[in-house]
Amino acid sequence: MERVKLEVRSRPERGGKAARAMRQVGEIPGVIYSSDTSTETTAITVGARDLRHAVSGATGIHTILDVSLDGGKARTAMIKDLQLDPVRDRVIHIDLHEVRADQTVSTRVAIHIEGSAPGVNMGGVLSQPVHEVAIDSLIGAIPDSITIDVGSLDIGQSIRLGDVPAPEGVTFTDDLESTILATVTVPTVEEEPEEEEGVEGEEGVEGEGAAEGGEGSASAAEDQAGEE
């Protein structure tokens, strides 16, 4: 998986007032959790623009980051949590988790579909119920995506997660049978309602009623206008 560099700075001041001041100048407060559980977390701040650039690739928030604190030596980390402002839909806090090369991590990877399903040529509809799957893997074995070939799918057939071999060093943690990655279904056809045959003489009656109703409506409108 591609790695992206991210520059962060240590944050001496904590508390809500300091955090609000940082956000006003385009900085996002956060913390880094060390891979050594005995080490305390480090309070940081990162530029909102720098963070957007880091997660703008195909792997999004699951990107592996080479985080440099105050210009020091980069250390590998992943985004553990993002807190969003529910109104403005912007990041207001970030948690990073440092990971070691020999440490198994849990993350998600994208599903990429390739090939042409025969069932589609027969009028079926190809759908992709899920676009990501959960995995456990060493940091160096995380793939950019999982590719599945739908070239053998006929109408009514599906590809489940259990049908796909996991890349070397990767373990799928979603349910292998219930997780459907791709399926070809029969298109839904909506039946048009049948037209009802008119009854002889009915049109004249409706016309007469409409005319009477129209006069009544006009009179009521005039009365209302007079009152106003």
Image (spheres, grey):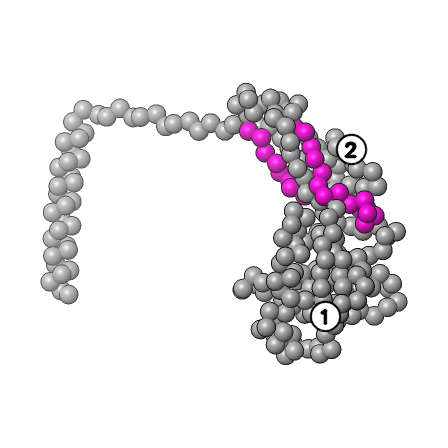
| Of residues 220 and 113, the one drawn nearer to the viewer in this rendering | 113
Of 67 and 182, nearer the camera is 67
Is residue 55 part of the magenta span, yes or no?
no
The image quadrant of residue 210 is top left
Residue at (67, 39) in percent of width and height: 111
Disc 1 marks which residue? 9
Q: Quadrant of residue 48?
A: bottom right
Looking at the image, can residue 133 be seen?
A: no
Of mark 2 and mark 1, the one earlier in the sequence is 1
- Residue 143 in view in this figure: yes
Check the picture and name the quadrant holding the C terminus.
Answer: bottom left
Against 180, residue 34 (above or below) is: below
**Kind of residue at badge 1:** Arg
Is disc 1 placed on a helix, strand or loop?
Answer: strand
Residue type indicated by callout 2 = Pro
Numbered disc 2: secondary structure: loop
Query: Which residue: 71% across, 60% down?
Result: 6
Q: Which mark is residue 110?
A: none
> Residue 37: horizontal and vertical position, in percent?
86, 64
Measured in 3D between alpha carbons, the distance from the residue under mark 2 to the one under mark 1, in whole angstroms, is 41 Å
Could you say where residue 88 lies in the image, as x and y percent from the top left? 54, 64
Quarter where residue 148 is shown:
top right
Q: Is residue 83 left or right of residue 196?
A: right
Question: Mark 2 = which residue?
Answer: 165
- Discs 2, 1 touching: Cβ within 8 Å: no
Q: Residues within 10 Å of mark 2 (few under 14, many from 20)?
A: few
**Residue 112 drawn above or below residue 88:** above
Percent coordinates x, y for residue 108 in the rendering: 72, 47
Q: Which residues are magenta?
A: 125-150
